[in-house]
């Protein structure tokens, strides 16, 4: 079976990295897999970018109308919004290819329009990496129009001017006549799909994002800290997100509140706790948490990230919404326990008080308790939590295990099309 993955990028962002890992997992399991992207950055011959400079120029020109339309919406929702308006030449290439199954990933915007997705004639599987597929133009939202339908009378009070989300959602209803096979990387996102007004009747399967646990594995903590120039002899708490604390959905404000509580604990004070932040450089004004903060900026290669996870005592992922939580699965593959909130996709990754701690949703006090509990485990029980974290990652996210699950979905999609 020939599988063709369609993704905006092979490496720029969490969704792109997940898509590429799925593609590589299939290749490593001897499946015929290829990937087409707008941005090919990894130098992998199995990943094909735009065919010529004319196509690249067209992709850039497609941004302008989308930006214009986005500007008509006034909202305080900080999530990206994609109207996916302008048609592209990708559809003809996809339909003329020899692929037996087309696997969509993060495609909205410059890659494919809403109409484009409806024009693909091949059997389709679509892995959702956020809420965009069943929502309006927003990639994440805290309201429930995606569940109730985007009506004129249920628009949230924080939006005004042009109702871009309702307009985008109605375009999806108009162009997507035939249900696609949906894959969600977590039970939370799958439940959202099944409750949505747009996709509630579409076949949906939960398959976690894969990770090559033969490569992503623990390294000695002393070596890891030496490589990164991090201090020895003190517990390191790790936080990471694209843009660091700038994205409110990543919950850095709640982590700050939790660390202020931890700082006041005599046990933590005695340990000499320090915070490591990756995904951003040191800001002009540092938050005053009463403990040292190390900013490592953007780490682009897997070896540096593997060293970083191995260097830490605990990884904190205080996100308000996560379709999966890839940094959490990476950390656990490296034997680092994770503290997160009991919400979203992270509940599929962290096993409470076995591989980390799931705090009550958005409760900074319980998040602080989780940090202290995890640090206490590293002192009292040695490597037990780290071993359990690594074992869970291998069992759930190993590349060949995930590839087998996708093979079954492809077979179902192909059979449904015949």
Image: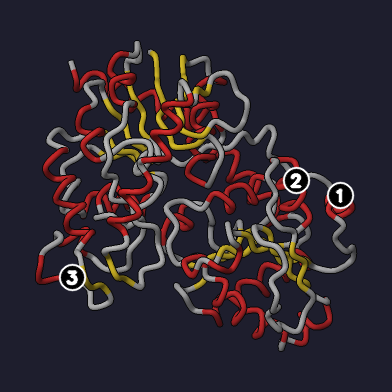
Which disc is residue 126 wearing? none
x and y, in percent, of residue 253 in the image: 56, 77
Of tags 3 and 1, the one toward the viewer is: 3
Question: Are the two marked residues, 3 and 1, in contact with CB atoms closer than 8 angstroms?
Answer: no
Mark 3 crowdedness (10 Å alpha carbons): few <14, some 14-19, many ≥20: some
Q: Identify the residue at horizontal 14%, vertical 51% (top origin).
A: 170
Mark 2 crowdedness (10 Å alpha carbons): few <14, some 14-19, many ≥20: some
Most foreground residue, 113 or 30? 113
Of tags 3 and 2, the one toward the viewer is: 3
Q: Identify the residue at horizontal 37%, vertical 39% (top origin).
A: 107
**Residue 238 appears anywhere in the view:** yes
Most foreground residue, 326 or 95? 95
Q: Identify the residue at horizontal 46%, vertical 41% (top origin).
A: 208
Which disc is residue 155 wearing? 3
- Write down the residue under mark 1: 227
The answer to which of marks 1 and 2 sits earlier in the sequence is 1
Disc 3 is placed on an element classified as: loop
Q: For residue 85, which quarter of the picture?
A: top left
User: Considering only vertical position in the picture, is 24 above or below 207?
Assistant: above
Most foreground residue, 48 or 184? 48
Question: Are the two marked residues, 1 and 2, in contact with CB atoms closer than 8 angstroms?
Answer: yes
Disc 1 is placed on an element classified as: helix
The residues bearing labels 1 and 2 have C-alpha atoms spaced at a distance of: 8 Å
């Amino acid at each position: 079976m020939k599988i063709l993955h369609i993704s905006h990028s092979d490496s720029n962002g969490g969704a792109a990295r997940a898509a590429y890992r799925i593609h590589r997992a299939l290749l490593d399991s001897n499946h015929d897999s290829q990937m087409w992207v707008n941005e090919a950055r990894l130098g992998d011959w199995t990943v094909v970018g735009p065919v010529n400079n004319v196509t690249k120029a067209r992709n850039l020109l497609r941004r302008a109308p989308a930006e214009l339309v986005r500007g008509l919406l006034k909202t305080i929702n900080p999530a990206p919004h994609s109207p996916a308006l302008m048609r592209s030449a990708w559809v003809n290439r996809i339909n003329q290819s020899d692929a037996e199954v087309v696997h969509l990933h993060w495609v909205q915007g410059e890659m494919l329009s809403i109409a484009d997705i409806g024009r693909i004639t091949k059997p389709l599987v679509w892995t959702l990496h956020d809420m965009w597929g069943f929502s309006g133009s927003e990639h994440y939202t805290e309201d429930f129009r995606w569940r109730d339908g985007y009506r004129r009378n249920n628009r949230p009070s924080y939006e005004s001017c042009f109702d871009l989300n309702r307009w985008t959602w109605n375009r999806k209803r108009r162009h997507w006549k035939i249900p696609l096979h949906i894959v969600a990387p977590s039970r939370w996102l799958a439940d959202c799909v099944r409750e949505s007004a747009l996709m509630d009747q579409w076949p949906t399967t939960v398959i976690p994002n894969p990770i090559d646990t033969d490569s992503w594995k623990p390294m000695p903590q002393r070596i890891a800290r030496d490589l990164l120039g991090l201090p020895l002899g003190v517990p390191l708490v790790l936080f990471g997100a694209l843009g660091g604390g700038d994205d409110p959905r990543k919950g850095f404000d709640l982590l700050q509140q939790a660390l202020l509580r931890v700082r006041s604990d005599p046990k933590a004070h005695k340990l000499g706790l320090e915070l490591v932040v990756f995904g951003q450089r040191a800001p002009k004004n540092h938050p005053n948490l009463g403990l040292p903060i190390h900013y490592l900026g953007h780490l682009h290669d897997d070896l540096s990230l593997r060293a970083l996870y191995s260097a830490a005592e605990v990884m904190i992922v205080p996100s308000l919404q996560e379709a999966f939580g890839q940094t959490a699965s990476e950390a656990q593959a490296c034997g680092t326990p994770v503290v997160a909130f009991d919400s979203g996709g992270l509940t599929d990754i962290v096993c409470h008080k076995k591989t980390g701690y799931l705090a009550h949703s958005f409760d900074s006090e319980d998040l602080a308790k989780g940090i202290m509990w995890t640090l206490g485990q590293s002192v009292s029980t040695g490597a037990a939590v780290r071993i359990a974290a690594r074992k869970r990652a291998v069992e759930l996210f190993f590349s060949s295990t995930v590839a087998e699950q996708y093979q079954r979905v492809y077979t179902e999609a192909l059979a449904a099309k015949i």
